[in-house]
Image (tube, coloured by chain):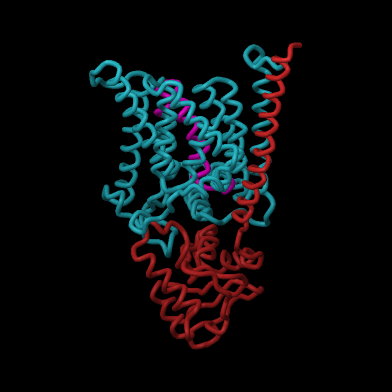
Chain colours: A cyan, B red
Amino acid sequence: MIDLQGDKRWIYALLAIAIAASVYSHSMVWKEFYYPTFGNTNLHVAFAQHMIAHGEYPIQNDYSYGGGIPTLYVPGYRILLAGTAFAVGSMDFAVRLLVMLFAVMLPIGFFLFARELFGDFAGLAAAFFASLPAELLIYTIRPLPQGLGLALLPFAFYAIAADKRKTALILTFVIAMVHQETIAFLAAGAFAFTFLQVLADFGRTRKIALPQGAAWTALLCWALALIAYVGWHFIATGNADVFGIAQFQNHEGNSVEFNLFLDKNGMVLTIGSLLGLVALAANNITNPKEKELLLIALALSASRSSKTIWWACACSWTGS
Amino acid sequence: MRFGQLASIASVLVIFAAVAYYANQDLESALNQAKPWMNPIVSKNEVAALDWVKANTAERTIFASDIFGGELLMSVLREGTEGGDWAIVPNVVQRMHDMQYDFYEAKSSKQAWGIALKYNAEYAWVPDRALFPGFAWKGVDYTVFEDARYFEKVFDNGHRIYKVKK
């Protein structure tokens, strides 16, 4: 029998297989004569090329739609891409290499987070399940800031769950500088977790008090995410009207209905998520544990999103 | 080994096999859904045309383009009238409308020329593939660019580049 509790080598061997599965599913990024272009991939290439050519970040002159406007996008991914392209000497190779980086990071991050919540078996299941949601694959198989943000997200939630405050804050800031929508999801999840924890504590003690432990770390991450998000918007545009951009004005995104949910997450994660939520509710609904609250908070945050990608993330954790 | 133990091992194996079976199906579905996103859209001739662009135009030169053409041009530090982060662009829907219906689907060269000038384009990017200027996929109508009073062909390897006359 495999002793997953004693001999940890089996765990790492299975994790290695999960990583190999993720690399396999992302390997199609090498097949075309040109890297994927859907999702503005070349806009980020432009900024990376500009940094390599001129040694500066053109914050006041975006390359989009004829240029001449400030760039709103945070620079983290572009700096990483510029550095990678500079190091390997080829932009084409660099963008595809970053997709491979996402492929390796995803199962490791999902493993760490789910293991922190519910132990080794859950960690391994989450690592394998990371390869199943179509939506997660679609967003991480292209060389985009979303891919890096999504690959970093489980590491940040792991740090919050484990109450590793310094790491959680560093990862929050890094994600805030990589992709705005990803940090919005992290902030929503972190705030919901803190709120639920305060509510649960109130239910137990009948007193309202500042959260402790992981919930306090989550609240700090929420605050940092908010400051970084609005701060960058202000630096780039000179105003703090984050909802004034065309993306919000034109209501980008779709509502997530059950068929779309099933299509983008697959059978295993959909059923797993439902069973996971039932188990969470049945186990400790009147006296929930901190880590259960974090998972519920993420599921609730995803359910308010118009994009299936957040559902896919939440499903992978809840399902496992 | 007792019957109870055998039954529990068998149950675990059945559940594991069922999960593995459906997980494999889900993985296949995910791969099939991801495949179309790997399509680079741009053509090989279009990518080859970037050498001419780099040799003959300055950085930040603006090309009248569709979204994918504009983004390809960005990769060599030129700009398209379309492509990139639409969230930050004022009147972006009007711009897409102009490029779709009054440039690539213009009724005359003069109409397309007017749009190119409106957006300060020095060249027109006319690929050998379907175009997507923001509203719909369309084939290329080369006759739009054939009136020599408004456009001059400066590159053709299947993909064409026209200079916009001043």
Q: Quadrant of the C terminus of chain A?
A: top right
Q: What stretch is highlighted in magenta?
A: A141-169
Residue farthest front in this picture = B3
Position above or below: B87 against B13: below
In the foreground, A290 or A64: A290
Q: How far across and down, in percent of the image, does residue A163 sit? A: 42, 21
Query: As drawn, is A203 to the left or to the right of B155?
Result: left
Q: Is residue B25 left or right of residue A169?
A: right
Is A165 above or below relative to A296? above
Q: Nearer the viewer, residue B3 or B33?
A: B3
**Relative vertical location of residue B131 with respect to residue A161 in this rendering, above or below:** below
Magenta stretch: dominant secondary structure: helix
Residue visible at 63% across and 65% down?
B43
Please provide percent x and percent y for residue B145.
53, 82
> What residue is shown at x 57% (from left), y 76% (from top)?
B140
Q: In which quarter of the image is residue B166?
A: bottom left
Which residue is pictured at 62% across the width and 49% down the height? A90
Task: Determine which quarter of the picture holds residue A218.
Answer: top left
